[in-house]
Image (spheres, rainbow, N blue to C red):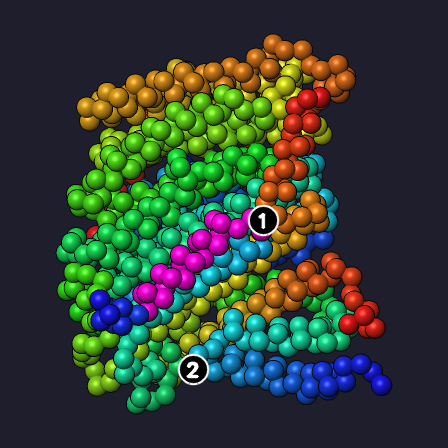
Amino acid sequence: MTPHLVLRIVAKLLIPLIVIFGLYVHFHGDYSPGGGFQAGVIIAAAVILYALIFGVENAKRAVPTWFVKFLAAFGVLLYGGTGVATLVLGANFLDYDVLHPDLAHHSGQHIGIILVELGVLSTVFSVMMAIFYAFAGRAPDIPEGEW
Amino acid sequence: MIEIIAERFNFVIVIILMMTGLYAVVATGNLVKRLVGLSLFQTSVFLLYITMGKVFGGQPPILPEYSEGHGENDAYAGEAAAAVTDHAAEAADIAESAASHGETVHHAAEAIYSNPLPHVLILTAIVVGVATLSVGLALVVRIRESYGTIEDEAINHADYAVDSARRNT
Amino acid sequence: MEFLASLLPASLVTHAPAIIVVTPLMMAAVAAIMPNGRLGWAVTLISTIVSALLALAIIVDVQTGGVVSYAMGGWAPPAGIEFRIDGLNAVLLMVIGALGLLSVIYALPSVADEIEEKKQSLFYSAFLVCFAGLIGVAITGDAFNMFVFLEISSISTYVLVGMGASSDRRALTAAYNYLVLGTIGATFFVIGVGFLYMATGTLNMADMATRLPDLSDSRVVQAAFAFIIVGLGLKAAMFPLHLWLPNAYAYAPNFVTSFLASTATKVAFYTLVRFLFDVFWPEAPFVEVSFLWVFAILGIIGMIVASVQAVFQDDARRLLAFSSVGQVGYMMLGLGMGTAAGLSAGMLHLINHSMMKGALFMALGAFAIRFGIRRISDLNGFARSMPFTSVAFTIGGLSLVGVPMTVGFWSKWYLGVAALENGWWWAVAALILSSLIALAYVARMLAAIWVAEPHHDKAGAIAHARAPWLMLGPLWVLAIANVWFFFQPDFLISMANAAAEAAFSGGAR
């Protein structure tokens, strides 16, 4: 019988729910408290919970360090890229209205906000994971029997 | 006296937290406790902004006619802020400005909207606080690995010993 | 200069205020994933060149067209965030752009020598974030946005200073203390901005300037003023709040120190000027009191005490760091006069000091390559083998003292003239006294370089020391600038006067 059975099973049930909640918070940032930063932290909390229960090594196999590094840079470039796209389309920096011609329903604003919030989500999630890996990876993992 | 504290309750809490945080930064010798005090100090500032921005009876700042995205909200934020603080600008004192935020909110449109701007400012400040805290903790981890201790006095002692040894060579 | 600026396409120039901040930020993300240090440096160099050219374009635009205003996201101010450049920021843009470019050219050999290979690209990434943050502080017109950019630049500065730990582990405690003090300063600033928002209902600095004069009796506004000047004074290393600076400059990598010494405190000083003269108005009673009793007095105390402390230092870079605190005192004295002449002299000293200190720290870095310079006696005997670097160092040192034939003379001259116009003979006496003290510590270092014999065990290595061309180039550009601007000071003086005029004409549209 593996130790900490209750913790493992409850974590396996909860982690997908936490990720879904994080995505909910992200997509509803337009209408209720939420947005990229909060969602990034919630999803990072899910992965950190996994790392706490199952070990940092297993977490690093699920979300590898090279992926975290890439995602951080990608998020910043996505945000900046949206701004550059608005510049190229002729308006001021981050003027989302030019991203879509339908001004009555402000589709340009919707598209712009979703893109930048996605960038924020990626960067915040990967930075939180990077901080956790940097700190947790320094001390040796406590072996199972020693808990 | 009690009325003043009861009315300005939020400011009292802000001041208590702020002073506690600053005292922790100054009085402790442990590096991690100093960061905890810094965090407490920053949290008091968040409370200051949020409680200052409270509009009693306010609804989420979204136009009711057609459920648009927040293209309107920025303009409304500006108007709501201007309307609410028009009264604040007449005041001459913290007390009056706090009271007018709460009570005498007039608004040109049909509904009273809460002010989203302080919340946005605080989100940004929270992110800044998280970044500062993580850089601080990373420095503490490196200091611990390098000096073997996180007590301020022991670190100063080690530096002074190295310095005087170097001076004597 | 107009010719260089006209090479850029017009569409780029209209969006220059956004691009000048966004390019270093996005290139920072690119630099972070570069596999080795050279590629990271290449990305940094490209991005710094772009920013420097755009800064040039903006400065020309301001000189010909007046205030440049750029609404982010198309949202018009005061509801939206705007980037606003007038004569006052143009000076800062010039300083940050020019010194950033020179420092980055200087960086390749210096960083390759001092930072481990696998961390170099991350180091350059942090530098680009700091650069973007400093430019952002200089050009933004929104008070809370200024706090955000100030913290962006500060947090990356803590990281950059901490990277000096590979040569001296005291960099870690220096970075930590800088972090704690800097965060307290920034938090005081944001408390002040919160009070101003409470009182005026707007975060746009130009808009605040129109609303504040009606509120001069409000305690909220006075409390905001107090918090803001303490917070920004800490970032600018005003006298009693300067304790983070000596250790941070002494133990950071050489490239970081030469960049920070020429830009970071200057940007914080600019924010002080902006708030004192633009947002708050100088005739307000509480502001007027602070000019003499806070800025001028603390400036003079800082000048003298910090220079005296510099004389007794053993560590070469710590000596120059204390000297920096003293020079900030000069700028505070210029600010404290409260007149356009005084402010203009302070801004002139800001420009000159960035040239002087940039040259001095770059020269120390050139001496230090492959060696590490700790104490002043480590500098013994370098003149024989590295004459170019030693002459450049000497020019910088003489400029620091204010000897005629170097540009430092002009800023002390104008400060003295402005003080006499104000009737402050005691300020002139303090200026002369601190220049004499500066002569003492500069002479110590020059004696070590030119006169003293190298230590026996190092004599052979010192005799073969050479500085790479990439380090000598920017160093000599700055050293020649120090001499050339003595003979042609008109450009600098006109920029400083334009800055003072922009500050006094206020932020009203």
Residues in magenta, as a range: B10-31
- Tell me if C456 is positioned left or right of C381 in this view: right
Residue drawn at (56%, 48%) of the image = B29
Which residue is outermost to the front? Answer: B2
- Residue A67 left/right relative to B128: right
Q: Residue A32, labelled with which disc?
A: 2
Residue type at mark 1 is Val
Residue C206 can be seen in this image = no
Q: Is residue C186 left or right of residue C358?
A: left
Q: Secondary structure at mark 1?
A: helix
**Percent from the top left, x then y, of residue B19?**
40, 56
Looking at the image, which is closer to me, C452 or A146?
A: A146
Q: Is residue C244 visible?
A: yes
The verdict on a common chain for dots 1 and 2 is no
Whether residue B21 is in magenta: the answer is yes
Q: Nearer the viewer, residue C373 or C179?
A: C179
Mark 1 lies on residue: C159
Q: Residue at x 62, y 24 (%)?
A: C375
